[in-house]
Image: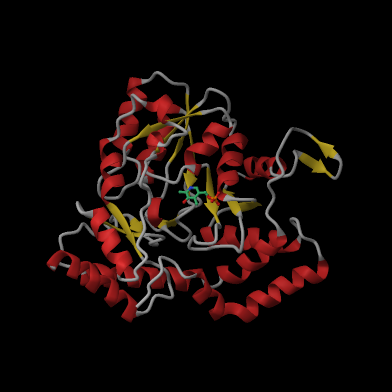
Amino acid sequence: MQVPLVDLRAQYSCIKQEIDAAIQRVLSHTGFILGREVEEFEKAFAFYVDAAAAVGVASGTSAIRLALQALGIGEGDAVITSAHTFIATAEAISQLRAVPVFVDVHPRTYTIDPNRIEELLKRGGYRFRAILPVHIYGQPADMDPIIDLARRHDLRVIEDAAQAHGAEYKQRRCGNIGDLACFSFYPGKNLGAYGDAGIVTGNDRDTLQKVRRLRDHGRVDKYRHEEIGWAERMDALQAAVLGVKLKYLEGWNEARRKHARMVTDLLGGCDVVVPFEAPYARHVYHLYAIQTDRRDKILSYLVGKGIQAGIHYPIPVHRQPAYFLCYSNTKLPITERLADRLLSLPMYPELTEVQISHVAECVRSFFNG
Ligand SMILES: *Cc1c(COP(=O)(O)O)cnc(C)c1O
């Protein structure tokens, strides 16, 4: 039996008619950049995360960069974040010539550890301007202590919610907790476009208005540009697809949560660490990752059985070739250990119980055999 890590075709075949019709509408009016579909999707997504407004952009990476820039972060400013993430989190900071300063993650939730942030702020040595927590794998970071530290040190908070569409922290949706929040609609995300897209959400309409200008050449009307911006708008085809898919997101997230519970139950007694859902969290399982000492062996065993497991992420950001020269003094023991031990098992809403049982059975047989 083949079990892919994600299966975008299975999802498309469930909603094909609606998607095709939405794409056809855009093709017939040919307003390909911004326009009605984007405005409607921005409203719908803001409503979904309970934020005042949302601004559609070209990718999750541009969402983070534009959010930081709109909050006034620039050259030489330090932004505190974690290294257990996709490189885009740090890259967006570096693109503004600001400096990512990495702190370690919590060993159970894998999200940034507020105690380490506090230690770093006490130690000093940087011009700290912001904290950029990542809701990694769909589990929200512990936001209350982060917001509290930010208030006390006059820092902005930007959520990297690229993996957390619909995740909740103490009954609040990720996307309206920090000053701004950034989502990616990369095709494999919980809510995925059919190409690149992203969005910035928040409650401060003035800052969001600034994101709106920055995404579109600093434009205030057709040929009047108040500042130097970027060409990073959301396009109408992506918005049309996302508008259809948003209606299904709650059901898909519930399916992911159900699958996660089932895998966790089936792996009971097995020598692996299963995901932990923090008491404050509604985890949306963008990824379902287990920890094991024998990660690389089990990965090839599963691949041999037709199961596409994966590693997120084998190299922490501070050890990436693009970064390590500047971070040779950065030691993040938990992050580094997780990079050697975590293994993502297949996870997507359309997984069948037969597939899930098969995956769990193969993991068990690896340890028993
Ligand atoms: C996917 C992702 C991004 C970047 O989003 P893109 O749309 O690929 O630019 C940023 N941060 C995290 C945690 C991600 O998973």
Tell which residue pokes out farthest to the right in this image. Answer: 223
Instruction: Give residue 351's position: percent from left, percent from top.
Output: 39, 75
Tell which residue pokes out farthest to the front in this image. Answer: 304
Image quarter for residue 68? Answer: top right
Rendered-image quadrant of the C terminus: bottom left
**Residue 158 in view of the camera:** no
Q: Residue at x 46, y 73 (%)?
A: 251
How many marks do you count on the picture? 0
Instruction: Give residue 86's position: percent from left, percent from top.
Output: 44, 46
Q: Residue at x 22, y 73 (%)?
A: 361
11 relative to 150 in the view: left or right = right
Rendered-image quadrant of the N terminus: bottom left
**Pick the front one: 314 or 248:** 314
**Residue 248 in view of the camera:** yes
Tell which residue pokes out farthest to the top in this image. Answer: 125
Instruction: Give residue 91's position: percent from left, percent from top.
Output: 52, 37
Up/down of 2 relative to 170, above or below: below
Q: Residue at x 19, y 66 (%)?
A: 366
Give the image's coloring scheme. secondary structure
